[in-house]
Image: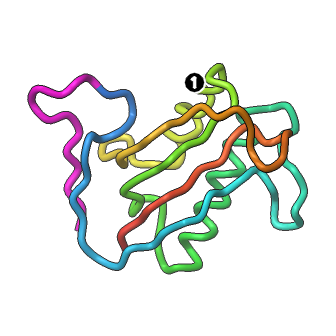
Amino acid sequence: MQHHIHRPVGSPPVKGYSHAVVFSGRTVVISGQVPLDATGRLVGKGSPEHQIRQVFENIRTALAAAGGSMGQIVKLTVFLTDLADLEDFRNVRDEFIDTTQPPACSLVQVSGLVNPEFRVEIEALAAI
């Protein structure tokens, strides 16, 4: 069960996320996913859109292994090395999540990730 509180009265406007999500069920924590494919190869070198898409594919794979789906994500934590990639993130994210009931989300600009070629890392929390 999930109840998305998209924009409570008195809170600022949002763009693609909910201010709060109330949920029950088994909690699945997905470690930070990076733009590597199943063979460990970097996907989308220099392309934020392709890197972000691979990260969401990795999240989908991890959730499926736990018996869940993308619609069960209640929280995303996003790390971008360049805020110029924000629009790419939003566009790709909206292909993978239910935009009528988006998860809560935090987005942080970081100076770097474990591999200097990574532009994005995303953690997820799901209730299945």
Residue lying at the far front of the rendered structure: 111
The type of residue carrying mark 1 is Glu
Which residue is found at the position 20% from the left and 34% from the top? 7
Which residue is found at the position 55% from the left and 55% from the top? 123
Q: How many marks?
A: 1
Q: Please identify the quarter of the rendering in which residue 52 is found.
A: top right
For the record, the magenta segment spans 1-13
In this view of the protein, which residue sits in the foreground, 31 or 62? 31
Residue 97 in magenta stretch = no
Task: Judge whether 96 appears above or below 64 on screen.
Answer: above
**Is residue 50 visible to us here?**
no
Residue 122 horizontal/vertical position (percent): 59, 50
**Is residue 120 visible to us here?**
yes
Tell whether 103 sits left or right of 88.
left
Residue 2 in magenta stretch = yes
Residue lying at the far left of the rendered structure: 9
Tell whether 51 sits left or right of 128.
right
Tell whether 11 sits left or right of 18.
left
Q: Please identify the quarter of the rendering in which residue 10 is found.
A: top left
Residue ID for mark 1? 87
In this view of the protein, which residue sits in the foreground, 34 or 114? 114
Main SS type for the magenta part? Answer: loop
Residue 126 horizontal/vertical position (percent): 41, 65
Task: Judge whether 81 appears above or below 74 on screen.
Answer: above
